[in-house]
Image: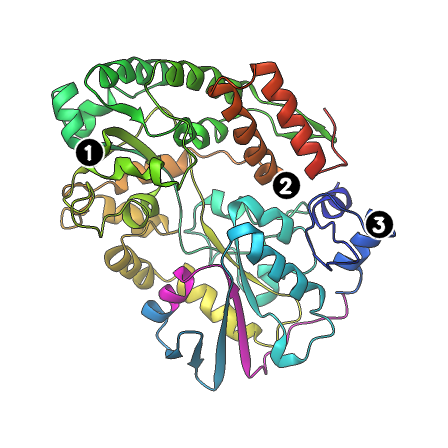
Amino acid sequence: MKKKIVSALLCATMLTGMLAGCGNTDANGTNGTQQAATGNTEKVSASDDGKVLNIYCWNEEFKSRITDHYPDYKEVDATHGKIGDVEVVWNITPSDDNAYQNNLDTTLLNQNDAQADDKIDLFLVEADNALKYVDTDYTMPIKDLGITDEDLSKQYQYTKDIVTDSNGTLKGVSWQGCPGVLFYNREAAKEVLGTDDPDEVQKYVKDWDTFNDTAKKMKDAGYKMTSSANDTYRVYSNNVTTKWVTDGKVSVDDNIMKWVDDSKKLVDAGETGTFDMWSDDWSKGFYPEGKVFCYFGPAWLVNFSMAADTEGSIGHDGGWGAAQGPQGFFWGGTWICAAKGTDNAGLIKDIMLKMTTDDDTMKDIVVKDDDFVNNKTVMEAMAKDSSYSSKILGGQNPLGMYCAGVESLDLSNICSYDQGCNEEFQKAMKNYFEGKATKEDALDLFYKGVEEKYPELSH
């Protein structure tokens, strides 16, 4: 099964040299690709005499965490720093149009032959593409760095599951957890529901039937329940009972089909829209005049992606509240992986331990960055700490909700095809929601799209 996953997902072409062409095969077929991906890495081993630490990532988040919380880091400029005598080089490529993965893949394919100072030492992955990388020999087992199970004992299990390969080997660590909640517009709640108290609001969104009933109340008062049908997608898709792909066959889980049916009713009733996430129209609900009741997301969404720093936004004025919502879910997250062949193994170990296991560092990240960290002891203590509150959430301490949500996560049904299947499914269903296709036609569009992306699959 491991060979099949590696062959399927690390499908490079001879022309591009990509690690993950997602559907193409080279002149020798997928077996040749598999050899390119895994066959030559055995001779590459880690050492600890490197003078340059090359870090590959897609945005400034991890760099800011290192700059602010790793005690020995000294910033030189926007893309360079120093840790002791080691030069740190940040290779930051945005994720737009898959640019980050394309750049990372090309560089990893050349890892064996690269000069020592040019080799990737540490790189970041996210939940949707983690298996693509950890199920190859390009990522080092965490235990090979000298990090033990005891070192990681306070971390949430789901954060380990995501970066565990098909042989059960842990290949990455994260400083954060990303359990999600429902963020609601407090003014809308008071106007329509008569209260903005989180416990009372939860009664109106406690399950999907109740949530959909509340959507009608919001519509009658001039509010959309959510900005887009896509806002609820991850909640449904995180609560499936089957994988997208089993033995090469693609199937759609019943809970995802429930999302389709529920969303179609909401769209037809004018209770939600069909905007693409991150679009200008989707974002209008960050402001009072946008008239949107709720969004779903983890701490990073409300803190960093909902215009909380912009005067006049709901978040800027502390106008959001948090409730548990109909089902527990997670969204995103960033994991640190050590590249096979690094010559900075000891430094990477120290970074991983300091940034993902040290209680004081973890608490500092929560207080200064309003992040939810990957440490049960710290989070449970801060959930009970009356001195901690979120300005964006009107002084509410949401950490207890996050803690409850993260414990309920079940990652047993994730698979290596999740990113592509989720993207193609939402894209296809938009046609159905907007009346441009029947449900059956939209399903056909999905199967066609995913099988073009992954030719080895069928349905």
Question: Residue at left 39%, top 38%?
Answer: 406
Element type at marker 3? helix
Q: Position of residue 174 (x, y in %)?
A: 46, 55
State which mark lies toward you, 1 or 2.
1
Give the residue at the far bottom of this rendering.
85
Frontmost residue, 219 versus 318? 219
**Marked residue nearer the N-terminal end (2 or 3):** 3
Frontmost residue, 335 versus 155? 335
Q: Is residue 323 above or below residue 306?
A: above
Residue underneath mark 1: 289
Element type at marker 1? helix
Q: Is residue 401 above or below residue 66?
A: above
| Amino acid at circle 2 | Ser
In the displayed structure image, the side of residue 192 where residue 125 appears, left or right: right
Residue underneath mark 3: 31
CA distance for labels 3 and 1? 56 Å
Q: Position of residue 166 (x, y in %)?
A: 67, 45
Element type at marker 2? loop
Q: Quadrant of the C terminus?
A: top right
In the displayed structure image, the side of residue 30 where residue 307 appears, left or right: left
What segment is highlighted magenta in the picture?
A: 42-66
10 Å crowding of disc 2: few (<14), some (14-19), many (20+): many
Question: Residue at left 45%, top 45%?
Answer: 332
Residue 412 visible in the picture: no
Residue underneath mark 2: 416
Residue 344 visible in the picture: yes
Name the image colouring.
rainbow
Q: Are marks 1 and 2 in contact (CB under 8 Å)?
A: no
